[in-house]
Amino acid sequence: MDKIRIMLVDDHTVLRSGLKMLINRQADMEVVGEAGTSLEMLQLVPKLLPEVVVLDLSMPGGPSLPLIKSLHQQNKKIHVMILSMHDDPAYVRAALAAGAKGYVVKTISEADLLSAIRMVHRGRVFIDLDDEARTAEVFQTPARLHATSTARLSEREIEVLKLLGQGMTNQSIAEQLDISPKTVATYRARLAEKLGLKTTAEYVKFAADHGYLGPQLQAD
């Protein structure tokens, strides 16, 4: 029987070791590789050819959501399952829109984690948050911005908001939009004033809840 080829991507070595031991005890799956950074993952994937990538939502070197698109560009057969400490439905919606097939929190039971991997490997969506009601909320239609709020945002502010919603840094946004980091900071300050947002988590949640997921986050 062919085993499910799994790659673990998390910057916590102890967590990866525990997951590896659990997975390798299963007759139908094996860990073919590990990575502690985004760059390491992208370098190893073409060599290891995993079928399922278990990816932490918060990785050194930048946000994980754009990495899903990079993985799919390398190999469209790769299925991504997010393993995160965040149980906010907005994060889940953002991950699914980016192309992830699964999203589970790190408090998940061993049995449910293994079930999640098997389902994701088959191309089925698997969501497991700490609370059943929050899991159900993932599939509810998110509220949209009121027209008055939308009218207050310029086209460039919306562009910046979409990229902030991916968890991107000011420097990364500046490079993508070909503007200076100082200019990005100015747009971010305007958004903070107009929308009352401050932290990266708030931007991610707002973008997901209000339909401001940029083209980079749309599923293939």
Image (cartoon, rainbow, N blue to C red):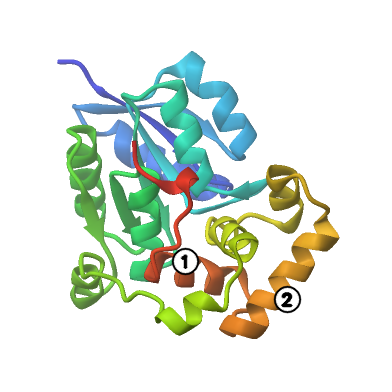
Asked whether the residues under the numbered discs 2 and 1 touch, taking CB atoms below 8 Å apart as contact, a structural biologist would say no
x, y percentage for residue 170? 73, 58
x, y percentage for residue 114? 23, 44
Return the residue nearer the eye: 145 or 78. 145
Q: In the rendered view of the protein, which quadrant contains the C terminus?
A: top left
Query: Would you call the spot at circle 2 few (<14 residues within 10 Å), some (14-19), or many (20 or more)?
Result: some
- Compared with 194, 27 (above or below) is above
Q: Which image quarter: residue 183?
A: bottom right
Residue drawn at x 29%, y 48% is 102
Residue type highlighted by circle 1: Ala
Residue drawn at x 64%, y 75% is 191
Residue type highlighted by circle 2: Ala
- Compared with 111, 34 (above or below) is above
Q: Label 2: which residue? A: 189
Query: Would you call the spot at circle 1 few (<14 residues within 10 Å), some (14-19), or many (20 or more)?
Result: many
Q: Label 1: which residue? A: 207
